[in-house]
Image (tube, rainbow, N blue to C red):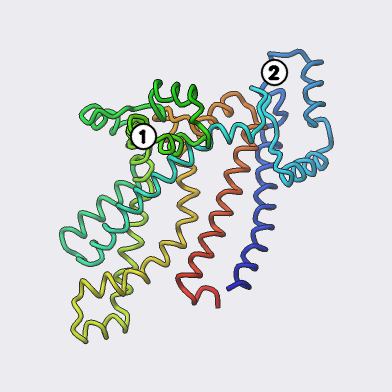
Amino acid sequence: MPRYILQRVLLVIPMIWVILTLVFIVLRVAPGDPVSAALGGKLNDEALDQRREALGFNDPLIQQYWDYLTSVARLDFGTTFSDNQTVLHVVRDNGGATLSLTLAAFLIALLVGIPLGLVAGRYRDTFPDVAIRIFGILSYAAPIFFVGFLLQAYVAKPLGLPTSGSAGVETVYYMERDGLNRTHILLFDVFLSGNSYYIEDALKHLLLPAVTLGLLICGVFIRLVRVNILQTMQSDYVEAAEARGIAQGRVTRRHAFRNALVPVITVIGLQFALLLGGAVLTESTFNWPGLGQKLVEYINDRDYVAVQGIVTIFAIAVVLISLLVDIVNALIDPRVRY
């Protein structure tokens, strides 16, 4: 096991290097001069040239690339030139909202997708199976902003749920006034405060965005669990268990289900990346103050330094999550590490 983990960790290094290189090429070379793109028309030519010189854009491309790699190695992801903040400060102030939304959506996708996939596999080619498969296809195929608008129009008002923001104005004000926003993750901070009103307010604001984003990958889990349950139920050890008189429901829950989860865990890293991409649309739909919405603002401002830094952090996060998934997968299934 230690050797397997070491191999996976060593593979992360070239993966991150390739990602950094692609991000640099796409977001530095493709758009052209980012300073002119963002500030052209606002500053004269002399001021633009001074800004390019200060940011290192007048250096040879290979020097810019080296400076970019060494800066990332020092955890320096640049400074935005639209609002003059370091990218790490932007991530600190807005990343908590994205993290809360992503984790909540992922939890909803697991709690809905895995049991439904288990039921669909257990009752193959029956009405529940057909209904669950149709639901999975629709949840995966429906545009995420369309699902968000439907929930806002037909669910929010009857249930009295808010449709924008991560918390009410009163909650945000008093949390900041009383110095309770210690972790910069509002959902964690309200639970740490112990104030039931703040907790209820934050959860109400989180519910619709999390359901919208969770439905994005719910269908994937349904299909994966169903297919792997069907394959596992045809295994020799399952037939042997049934031959000993063990009820099929118990065989499914106690024996087939665990093996069916191995491919699901493998896909979790990829689905996490999909959730980060979907968070951009979800945050824009619900005016959620996370990194996705901030990224859209920087794209509109053509602040490519900010975009480059945020995309780089997203990419590194996805690689590290994939590494964690590989390790967990190896712990569950010993065949993976041999």
In which quarter of the view is residue 307 placed?
top right
Compared across the picture, whether 118 is left or right of 179 comes to left
Tag 2: amino acid = Gly
Residue 199: numbered disc: 1
Residue at 47% of width from left, 50% of height from top? 272
State the CA–CA distance, disc 2 to disc 1: 45 Å
Q: Is residue 230 visible?
A: yes
In which quarter of the view is residue 279 placed?
top left
Foreground residue, 284 or 41?
A: 284
Compared across the picture, whether 139 is left or right of 331 comes to left
Q: Is residue 148 visible?
A: no
Residue 118 lies, with reference to residue 139, above or below; the image says below
Residue 177 lies, with reference to residue 281, above or below; the image says above
Q: For the residue labelled by badge 2, is the local secondary structure a helix, a strand or a loop?
A: loop
Name the quarter where the N terminus is drawn. bottom right
In which quarter of the view is residue 89 placed?
top right
Residue at 21% of width from left, 86% of height from top? 243
Name the quarter where the C terminus is drawn. bottom right
Tag 1: amino acid = Ile
**Spot occupied by residue 299 in the image (x, y as percentages of width and height):** 58, 29
- Residue tagged 2: 40
Q: For the residue labelled by badge 1, is the local secondary structure a helix, a strand or a loop?
A: helix
Residue at 51% of width from left, 70% of height from top? 330
Residue 183: numbered disc: none
Residue at 37% of width from left, 35% of height from top? 206
**Spot occupied by residue 276 in the image (x, y as percentages of width and height):** 49, 43
* Between discs 2 and 1, the one toward the N terminus: 2
**Spot occupied by residue 298 in the image (x, y as percentages of width and height):** 58, 28
Q: Nearer the viewer, mark 2 or mark 1?
A: 1
Foreground residue, 59 or 205?
A: 205
Residue 89 lies, with reference to residue 25, above or below; the image says above
**Spot occupied by residue 179 in the image (x, y as percentages of width and height):** 51, 27
